[in-house]
Amino acid sequence: MENKEVQEVMKPLFVIWTALCLGQMLIAGVFYYLIATGKEDPVSTSLVLLLILGLGGFAAILTGVFIYRVRLKSIVRKDNVNILDVNAVPENANYLTECLLHYRANNIVRYAFMEGGNILFLLGAFLTHQITFFILFFVGLLLFAAMSPSVRKFGNDYHIAFSPLD
């Protein structure tokens, strides 16, 4: 597989990531509007609710990152694989295909957990009207944005080189 073919395989993953990112921002905008215009009153500011939403959000985001790393160890070879050697070593083509499928599934799981954490932060902001939850959401959104899929990240995580210089 060439670098171009790898990019084609990653397009659906990038579409999923973009949709999740935009959805989170849209929900944040709606919640902010409702809070800023005073159309919704705070439901509760109990310590239990604050802890559940805050710690739940952090736990979900960290779980997503942890699961990604654990699942990554199950497939990655110790040695670097250069895709340019596909003709010389046919197993490299199979390894690349396996890694691409694994990368896509692994990222979808990570994105789901991270989005879940961010949604908990947004619910905290909506229910309590505390800006702290919006700040936590934006930190989570920045982490989510940093996890965007790319060929370079795929190569780094799975120890795959796409050129002789990698």
Image (tube, grey):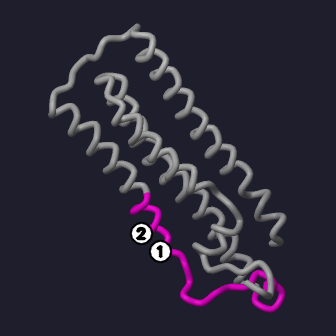
Q: Label 1 crowding class (10 Å Cα cut-off): few <14, some 14-19, many 20+? A: few
Q: Residue furthest left?
A: 47
Q: Contact, CB < 8 Å: mark 2 with mark 1?
A: yes
In this view, the residue in front, 147 or 5, is: 147
- Occupied quadrant, residue 46: top left
Q: Amino acid at mark 1?
A: Ser
Range of residues picked out in magenta? 65-89
Location of residue 67 with respect to 47 vertically, above or below: below
Decide if residue 158 is on the left or right side of residue 96. left
Q: Amino acid at mark 2?
A: Val
As drawn, the label of residue 74 is: 1
As drawn, the label of residue 64 is: none
* Residue at left offset 79%, top offset 57%: 8
In the rendered structure, does residue 67 fall within the stretch colored magenta? yes
The residue to which callout 2 is attached is 70
- The image shows residue 125 at horizontal and vertical percentages of 36, 28
Q: Quadrant of the N terminus?
A: bottom right
- The image shows residue 44 at horizontal and vertical percentages of 21, 21
